[in-house]
């Protein structure tokens, strides 16, 4: 696993946004992008838990793989948390606007 693979969620979000701005024939919706990011983050969390369980059971002795899987899951979660915070902040700012 490389560091490039750990940013797959961010890269897919950027690529989808670029294809939407370029006038792609069938753009994904924002809700689909969020669903994909959630699915990716959940998959990384499951993979981290599986690698931790296999390490605890003695099936593998690679501490680096376990730490890398945990770091990737943590990074994905932090990204989603920051995205949520930004969305809530934007919603609150829009709701404070006077029309």
Image (tube, rainbow, N blue to C red):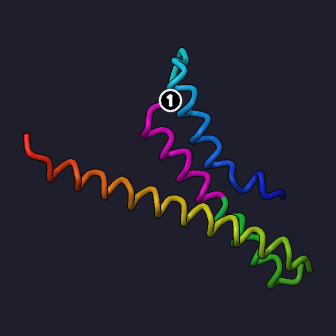
Q: Which residue is mark 1?
A: 28
Q: Quadrant of the N terminus?
A: bottom right
Q: Position of residue 26 (x, y in %)?
A: 52, 19
Q: Nearer the viewer, residue 46 or 63?
A: 63
Q: Position of residue 52 (x, y in %)?
A: 75, 77
Q: Position of residue 79 (x, y in %)?
A: 54, 60
Instruction: Identify the magenta region.
Output: 28-43
Q: Position of residue 39 (x, y in %)?
A: 57, 51
- Which residue is pictured at 38% across the width and 61% down the height? 85
- Indicate left or right for 81 with 69 as reference: left
Corner quadrant of residue 76: bottom right
Q: Among all residues in the image, which is located at the extreme left?
A: 99
- Indicate left or right for 88 with 82 as reference: left
Above or below: residue 16 compared with residue 93: above
- Which residue is pictured at 57% across the width and 42% down the height? 13
- Which residue is pictured at 62% across the width and 49% down the height? 9
């Amino acid at each position: 696993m490389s560091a490039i693979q750990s940013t797959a969620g961010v890269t897919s979000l950027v690529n989808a946004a670029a294809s939407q701005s370029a006038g792609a024939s069938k753009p994904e919706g924002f809700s689909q992008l969020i669903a994909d990011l959630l699915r990716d983050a959940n998959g990384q969390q499951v993979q981290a838990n599986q690698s931790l369980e296999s390490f605890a059971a003695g099936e593998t002795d690679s501490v680096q793989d376990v730490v890398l899987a945990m770091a990737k899951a943590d990074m994905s979660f932090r990204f989603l948390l920051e995205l949520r915070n930004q969305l809530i902040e934007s919603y609150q700012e829009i709701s404070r606007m006077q029309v």
